């Protein structure tokens, strides 16, 4: 099976603080992967590295590949990083849409990387592009709002428009950073249902950071759980178990420096380095 995500030995420091410590990941499942972990554990930082928006510490052996393509290595952008970014759809907590523009125009912006320069400068899109944008809006249930300003939409509706823009962009993977954090429970469920549907029917793999464990267990097939910048667990969502989840979010201090030992997918589930620390009792 082709790898969706491959990360080798990824570390990231901000000043003297290590936000990510020697992360290695292999995800081949084309479903939805959740990045879980307590606040400050490094979820958003990891997602930004996967999407080529941020670069790691410069260390020998560091690599990030998405859908088989090198995004960055040894802390530097790969030559094809722009192409990698253009192939990825981004959905953020703060709706990253242009508020004063119409819903339709925001979706059309998804086509910019494949649009002639003069057309992007004049904001003039082809009839075909407009039809595609309407089809994308229809796909997410937002066609009736096409000519409304984005600023008039609810948070859940704005996330649907962001998803339509990813479809317009023909994204081959979607990165979503806390897409439901600002939404009420019903809107959150609707957005997760839509992501699930897009994943199943369009076959677009999705990586999503989440605070809500229940949503991760319900909608995501794979989990990558981070704790203090290290991989605590990676594997099937169905296999994590309550004790490991309790330990993941426990306030108990962890002091030792851990490294993933061997291939971390199967059979390794909870990083054994954590099991030897002060949270050991909760895992056994
Ligand atoms: N640009 C930055 N400059 C300095 N420190 C940063 C920066 N970005 C992240 N950090 C630090 O890196 C660590 C990981 O942050 P990150 O935002 O990735 O965590 P997170 O798990 O996504 O947290 P949350 O769930 O609260 O969003 C934190 O200690 C954070 O303060």
Image (spheres, rainbow, N blue to C red):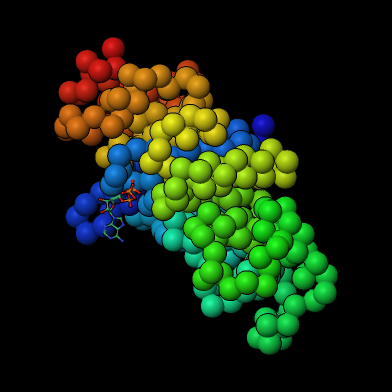
Res 217 seen here: yes
Quadrant in the picture for residue 143: bottom right
- The residue under the point 69% across, 38% down is 200
**Residue 78 in sight from this viewpoint:** no
**Which residue occupies the foreground of this view, 222 or 158?**
158
Q: Quadrant of residue 245?
A: top left
Q: Quadrant of the C terminus?
A: top left
State the residue in front, 156 or 45: 156
Please say if 155 is above or below 98: above
Task: Count all numbered tags in the image, as a single digit.
Answer: 0
Residue 173, relative to residue 239: is it above or below? below
Q: Is residue 126 left or right of residue 34?
A: right
Percent position of residue 1, x then y: 67, 32
Q: Where residue 189 appears, x then y in whole percent?
A: 53, 41
In the visual, does 39 lie left or right of 278?
A: right
Horizontal and vertical percent position of residue 205? 62, 43
**Residue at left 75%, top 78%?**
125
Residue 21, image x and y in percent? 31, 42
């Amino acid at each position: 099976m082709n790898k969706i995500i491959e990360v080798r030995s990824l570390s990231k420091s901000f000043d003297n603080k290590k936000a990510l410590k020697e992360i290695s990941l292999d995800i081949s499942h084309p479903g939805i992967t959740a990045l879980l972990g307590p606040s400050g554990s490094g979820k958003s930082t990891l997602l930004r590295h996967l999407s080529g928006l941020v670069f790691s510490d410069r260390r020998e052996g560091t690599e990030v590949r998405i859908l088989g393509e090198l995004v960055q290595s040894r802390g530097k952008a790969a030559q094809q990083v722009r192409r990698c970014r253009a192939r990825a759809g981004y959905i953020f907590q703060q709706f990253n849409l242009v508020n004063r523009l119409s819903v339709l125009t925001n979706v059309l912006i998804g086509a910019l990387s494949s649009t002639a320069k003069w057309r992007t400068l004049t904001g003039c899109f082809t009839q075909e592009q407009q039809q595609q944008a309407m089809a994308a809006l229809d796909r997410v249930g937002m066609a009736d709002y096409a000519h409304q300003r984005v600023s008039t939409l609810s948070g859940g509706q704005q996330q649907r428009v962001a998803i339509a823009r990813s479809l317009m962009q023909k994204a081959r993977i979607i990165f979503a950073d806390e897409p439901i954090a600002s939404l009420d429970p019903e809107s959150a469920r609707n957005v997760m249902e839509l992501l699930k549907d897009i994943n199943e029917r369009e076959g677009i793999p999705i990586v999503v950071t989440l605070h809500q464990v229940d949503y991760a267990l319900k909608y995501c097939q794979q989990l990558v759980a981070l704790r203090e910048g290290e991989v605590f667990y990676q594997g099937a969502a169905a296999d994590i178990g309550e004790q490991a989840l309790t330990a993941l979010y426990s306030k108990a201090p962890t002091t030792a420096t851990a490294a993933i030992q061997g291939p971390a997918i199967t059979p390794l589930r909870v990083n054994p380095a954590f099991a030897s620390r002060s949270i050991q009792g909760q895992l056994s």
